[in-house]
Amino acid sequence: MPSERNFVKMLMTQLKKIPNSWWYKIPDPVRCPKCHVSGLGNKRPFDIVGCVQGYFIALEAKSGPKAVCSDHQTANLYLVQAAKGYTAVIHPENWQRIITDIRKYINL
């Protein structure tokens, strides 16, 4: 099983193949080298955000199907869904299905 970092890298390559799309990997929080903490408290809303033909997409990458989203990640995913955006928790076992779902969601 690939690490989450390697999986996201591979996933970005696949997502960029979707026509009329823009994708951005949210960077890891910057840590203070002296105190080993970040200004965000290690929280970021999603791993990947994108826009495909005007539709907002938020993806939370996990290293495997048993990995669980934090409460704050789950809350952010629900907020995007409530705003009519597409969200998914994506991992190495379901990534091809999610990309197919994204294409269906935007009628490609």
Image (cartoon, rainbow, N blue to C red):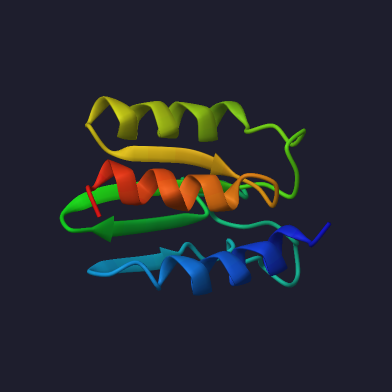
Q: Residue at x 75, y 70 (%)?
A: 34
Q: Residue at x 49, y 46 (%)?
A: 98
Q: Residue at x 59, y 63 (%)?
A: 28
Q: Is 77 left or right of 70, judged from the image as shown?
A: left
Q: Nearer the viewer, residue 65 or 19?
A: 19
Q: Residue furthest right?
A: 1
Q: Is 10 left or right of 83, judged from the image as shown?
A: right
Q: Nearer the viewer, residue 77 or 104?
A: 104
Q: Residue at x 27, y 70 (%)?
A: 19
Q: Is residue 76 above or below residue 15?
A: above
Q: Residue furthest left?
A: 54
| Relative image position of residue 60 (x, y in whole percent) | 54, 46
Q: Is residue 36 above or below residue 71?
A: below
Q: Is 80 left or right of 37, judged from the image as shown?
A: left
The mark tally for this picture is: 0
> Quarter holding the N terminus?
bottom right
| Relative image position of residue 106 (x, y in whole percent) | 23, 47
> Quarter holding the C terminus?
bottom left
| Residue 90 placement: quadrant | top right
| Relative image position of residue 12 (x, y in whole percent) | 51, 69
Q: Is 87 left or right of 55, judged from the image as shown?
A: right
